[in-house]
Amino acid sequence: MAKVAVIGAGIVGVSSAEWLRRDGHEVVLIDPKGPAGETSAGNAGLIAAPSVSPTQYPGVEWRALRDLALGGAFRLDWGRLPHLAPWLFAFWRNSGAVRVRELANAIHTIAGDAVEQHRILAAGTPAADFIGEGEWWHLHRSTLPKDNKGVAIKREFGFPVRVVAEAELRDRDPHLNPAYRSAFALGGYGRISDPAAYVQALAAHFQDGGGRLLLTAARDLRPMENGVKVTCEGETLDVDKVVLACGVWTETFARQLGVRSRVISERGYHVECWGANRSPPDGVAYQLTDTLHVGHALRGRFRVTSISEPAGLDSPPSSRAMAYVRRGPRLFYPDLEQDRVTEWMGRRPSTPDSLPLIGAAPNNPNVLFAAGHQHIGLTAGPKTGRLIADLVSSRPPNIDLTPYAPNRFT
Ligand SMILES: Cc1cc2nc3c(=O)[nH]c(=O)nc-3n(C[C@H](O)[C@H](O)[C@H](O)COP(=O)(O)OP(=O)(O)OC[C@H]3O[C@@H](n4cnc5c(N)ncnc54)[C@H](O)[C@@H]3O)c2cc1C
């Protein structure tokens, strides 16, 4: 059995650490902020198994330009444009119809069975209580568009989609903004009722089972003949394998290994209305198709997320983006009231082809990448963790990992 250090305790790192522990490895999970201290805490809480479409699509540039001109959900950290431009160009190059279909296949491979993967990982632990299932309703202000590619591709991959007419909308949610008059109800989604508490429950189970959590930052990786020296603040570890599961911070370590990860920070924001008098019906999350606000009832609060904002890693949050998200709750419910509102900004680890990096570093089989899950990290974290355990335990994975090769941008 191997000594393994997992760097990063978001959903991807915690899932990897737990699957490795179950395989009998001696695992230390390293994170200065503890489990779910960053992106894995603030997401929309959807296990988005049917969301097979990559974030790029034919014509994405026009939506982006429109949003930039009118102040929509796509934004840019303009000060970092020189740094971001090559990534944006590569992202756009992946937006042709044929390429998008290839990417959708690869996303489906790692995310399509995500609800089941979460249930298997959490079974028999307190984390299981956070998992539910339901529909994601994409709300429209007018009649539903006939030619909806996002809907068509979900159907093609076998996920149920039904039409919600105005009468059902009013019946299920009488307080919903009457401007929204119809919806596509997308089935096959899972829900996590509190993403941070869920990841923390999985991490607690990992520790109860003998895994070690080290609350410090890893600073340096030094490949040795038969392993890796990991220098952390306050401690140095000699391990057989290292798993890089540190989200947007992966690039720092990738560079040390001569790998170009191309993971950038694509920021998103949320507001939470605690003690709200309104929220979506049980088992339903909403998306406003015109403004791209997502609304989901989590434990004790109504969380609204939005914004895709490629940005520098350490740039301060944008007050304009935050203001855009703050408008969201009342777009859902014009008569919304709440006890208090909290706000958050987080960093999606995003690659130019919308696929994560999963697998060994090209020049070092003892360092494994598990990063770059962009908009679906909560969804695909558990399966990624299982694949990482397969690789460390020398079990051939039952999927082809080529599309996720960590050296594909190097
Ligand atoms: C607004 C928003 C909504 C979203 N909605 C959804 C959704 O509904 N469904 C979905 O599937 N996904 C969603 N996502 C995406 C999802 O949240 C991310 O893909 C996922 O959380 C990434 O997980 P991670 O473990 O890779 O990274 P993180 O959760 O960011 O974890 C990385 C960890 O690495 C640690 N770290 C960094 N540097 C070091 C170091 N030197 N040493 C040790 N540790 C280090 C950090 O402290 C951090 O805890 C959303 C994201 C946003 C922003």
Image (cartoon, rainbow, N blue to C red):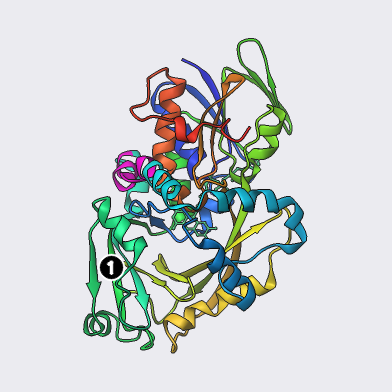
Q: Is residue 261 left or right of residue 194?
A: right
Q: Residue at x 51, y 31 (%)?
A: 405
Residue closer to the observer: 70 or 306: 70
**In the image, residue 392 lies at what x, y percent?**
47, 21
- Please tell me how crowded label 1 is: few (under 14), some (14-19), or many (20+) other residues with Cα within 10 Å: many
List the single residue furthest toward the top: 225
Which region shows up in magenta? 108-120
**In the image, residue 379 lies at what x, y percent?**
41, 49
Relative height, residue 231 to residue 348 (above, below):
above
Q: Quadrant of the C terminus?
A: top right
Q: Quadrant of residue 186?
A: bottom left
Q: Residue at x 33, y 54 (%)?
A: 50
**In the image, residue 313 lies at what x, y percent?**
70, 51
Q: Is residue 314 left or right of residue 272?
A: right
Q: Is residue 20 left or right of residue 241?
A: left
**In the image, residue 290 lies at what x, y percent?**
45, 76
Q: Residue at x 26, y 84 (%)?
A: 166
- Dot 1: element: strand
- Identify the amino acid type marked 1: Ala
| Residue 355 shows in this picture | yes
Residue 117 within the segment the image draws in magenta? yes
| Residue 20 shows in this picture | no
Residue closer to the observer: 37 or 46: 46
The residue that disc 1 covers is: 185
Residue closer to the observer: 224 or 352: 352
Q: Residue at x 39, y 23 (%)?
A: 23
Residue 26 within the segment the image draws in magenta? no
